[in-house]
Image (cartoon, grey):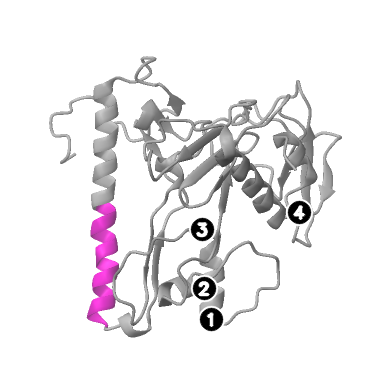
Amino acid sequence: NCYDETWRGEQLIWPPYGVRNVERGVITAREGQHIRCNYGSKLSMIDHWFGKVLDTIDQNDLWDDTMVILCTDHGHYLGEKDIWGKPGVPQYEPLGHTPLYIAYPGIDATEIDALSTNVDINATLCDLFDVTMQHETHGVSLLPLISGEQASVREWALGGIFGNWVQVYDGHRKYARAPVDDGFPLSLWSNRWSTMPIKRIDPPWPMPDDRAVLDFMPGANIPVIRQMFQPGDLLPYWVHPRVGEHHLYDINIDPDEAENRLGGQDEKDMVELLNQGLRAVNAPDEQFQRLGIG
């Protein structure tokens, strides 16, 4: 590893998922440094090979009719707030604020300060190729932003963690709403029970039972399995509801998300915005009940 030449221990690439890992002795501060160095090596590798893609576009003079989009699904905690991996915490900036780079023919390089989310990429491509989508979508085309016709295309973006926080972001305020009461009702809606590659052949995961039904998610005409859970059930391993632990941060004045600004008009505004966003995507009624809003 060119970024950690003094390391002589086992190569650590993937951090153990958890909160306060260094504080609790799960890993040492030095091991955490080595993990971050390996991340740096991966970035260098990506830079090298992605650079070859861009070089090929240069060599073939393709920029006049080629659009390039570079994005990712989510971030990964590498020690920020002593958080590692993707444990059950709200989507702080290292996880939720993902890169989006777009090269578009005839548009000079610039930075656009506007809110977007990953589902907007689908809408953008459909707009670019004049495709009419035959199903419901939550995305908004980014072409008006790219061309400079509009300064913004959306007022909010939704995110969250299944069974835990649902959050809304308006461009500077981030509100993560936790479940209330006992964290129920809760259902898992899925067209696949699990295709996650794991080493165990008998993972301690709940399987569908006689409460499972075929149901339709909003905007879809193909049914999925809807498994309803209740208190006392074995829940999917990532579900440990932090009941009542709401979070509100103002990224503009607190980029490290250190001060929880609950209370006052800001929280009321963000609860209303979350309500608005969930209704716009036709969230099921049980979601509003679970979060204690609406």
Disc 4 on helix, strand or loop?
A: loop
Mark 2, residue position: 125
Q: Would you call the spot at circle 4 few (<14 residues within 10 Å), some (14-19), or many (20 or more)? A: some
- What segment carries the magenta color? 45-60
Q: Nearer the viewer, residue 244 or 269?
A: 269
Label at residue 217: 4
Residue 55 forms part of the magenta stretch: yes
Q: How far apart in space, not on screen, are marks 2 and 3 (Cα)?
A: 12 Å
Q: Earlier in the sequence, mark 1 or mark 4?
A: 1
User: Which kind of residue does numbered mark 2 sit on?
Assistant: Leu
Residue at 41 percent across and 29 percent down: it is: 83
Residue 50 forms part of the magenta stretch: yes
Q: How far apart in space, not on screen, are marks 4 and 3 (Cα)?
A: 20 Å
Q: Position of residue 204 (x, y in %)?
A: 64, 26
Label at residue 129: 1
Label at residue 118: 3
Q: How far apart in space, not on screen, are marks 4 and 2 (Cα)?
A: 24 Å
Q: In the drawing, does residue 69 fall left or right of residue 160?
A: left
